[in-house]
Image (cartoon, rainbow, N blue to C red):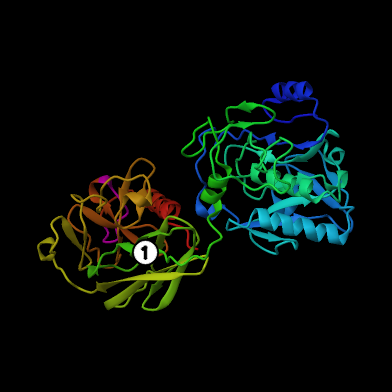
Amino acid sequence: MKRTFALSVVLALGMASTAVAAPRGSYKWLGEPNIGANWTPPPAAAVSHVIYLNNCQPNGCNLNAGYDNSTTNTSSIPDTTSTVSAYSGSASNWTALVNCVKQVYSPFDIQIVTERPTSGNYHMAIVAGTPQQVGMSSGVFGVSPFSCGYISNSISFTFANLAPSDIPELCWTVAQETAHSWGLDHKYDNRDPMTYLSGGPTIKQFQNEAGSCGEYSARGCQCNYPNTGSTKMNSFAVILGTFGSSAPDTVPPVVSVTFPTENTQVTPGFPVRATITDDRIIEKAELRLDGQLIGTDMEEPWEWQTPATLSQGKHKIEVKAYDRAPNVTGATVNVQYGTVCATASDCDAAGNVCLDGHCVAGPTMPGGLGTTCTSNADCSSMQCGNDGTNGYCVEACDLTADACPDDFACTDVGGGTGVCWPSEKGGCLAAGRSGNGAFILAIGLVALLITRKRRR
């Protein structure tokens, strides 16, 4: 049978020597340069827990050629636009197959559906048609894109019309091809769905033990897997590490607000940063200011920018995290906005400076005002300004007051917004000091726009 991956010659010879006639599943090596051979579990947010079993009824499945995107019916397997004919088996056969796939994946936090999801990401397992319809040879029973990592929105194929009523064979192939899309190699173990070997149990289950990769003989694995490297693969552990367990999730997330800290003096537009962990997957995190929802993040980093309008007085910050159960955990921090300083000597923390009547981290503190930066994350204020030559951490300032600390000037960056910029670097200054006005004004506006975090 024709092979479509890196070891095509070796595998073809192996098949010829063993004279195995039954069609088997295959995979197509994508070889993305950004993935490489050192596989690690993907970020939680990149993983969809949904497998959509598509039998292409009643009129077949039309596919576009290109990088995989199940939501647009685009597949890396065919080289041209293709049509896969509808599954030719009976309704009872289809029901039996769906139940078998659910049973094989039952240990994991994976949902098997037969209706196309109306939103979100998902793996689409096409269970229909014949291999020739997507440019495969007659000896291929299934095929999937493959790399040493999780492929988002991938499409796998089980050519069910070759044996529409052979439920164990179809179930075996669906499990193998879907798992190829998550970075699993073939396994030299006839109990496991990733095997090529005949015999073993009728319904194969992912084995929770490390074993050699291989088709009809043992070989090294194409990828490096956690704890086993490239010498062995534990298919159960790899899938568990990617999707988590199907057991009830009773462990809530752990949330900590890392900035600002309790009783910090803040200025309008201050950033909020948090660390969030969970034994499984964080679904989303929300920021509330005085009970009002400010923003929702679906993935790390858990960071938000608060509104530029803030009344004087005390305020309550709350970060809430949700896992998929959903378990919910919140963490709160109290802050204050108000006139607390006239000079740096009025600030309690060493290294703070006074800005518009508020204490902020100064040039001698990590990430403080005026320290060099390349991104927002380098700055306590979460604002890194760049004039095309230098990058400095900046703080918002009142253009009418020009109350930046010594050696800084409140520079107009457009839209009525000012930031404290090192005065020795020049600037269009709100108080009417000399400087290259139009030039620095344009630069300041660009700097603020390109470094501010996108709201979600």
Q: How many marks?
A: 1
- Judging by the rendered image, the residue that carries numbered circle 1 is 255
Where does residue 227 sit, x and y in percent of width and height?
46, 38
Residue drawn at the location 75% of the way across and 63% of the way down: 115
Q: Residues within 10 Å of mark 1 (few under 14, many from 20)?
A: many
Query: Looking at the image, is 237 positioned above or below residue 414?
Result: above
Residue drawn at the location 40% of the way across and 55% of the way down: 448
Which amino acid type is marked by label 1?
Val
The one of 357 and 41 positioned closer to us in this rendering: 41
Query: Looking at the image, is 280 positioned above or below residue 67?
Result: below
Which residue is most to the left?
345
Snapshot quadrant of residue 108: bottom right
Residue drawn at the location 62% of the way across and 48% of the way down: 152
Residue 321 relative to residue 424: left or right: right
The residue segment tinted magenta is 425-432
**Residue 51 seen anywhere in this rendered image of the structure:** no
Residue 226 relative to residue 215: left or right: left
The question of residue 237 being in magenta is answered with: no
The one of 264 and 325 positioned closer to us in this rendering: 325
**Residue 94 seen anywhere in this rendered image of the structure:** yes
Snapshot quadrant of residue 37: top right
Which residue is most to the front?
200
Where does residue 5 sit, x and y in percent of width and height?
69, 30
- Dominant secondary structure of the residues highlighted in magenta in the image: loop
Where does residue 179 sit, x and y in percent of width and height?
64, 45
Q: Secondary structure at mark 1?
A: strand
Residue drawn at the location 87% of the way across and 53% of the way down: 86
Residue 109 relative to residue 416: left or right: right
Residue 395 relative to residue 71: left or right: left
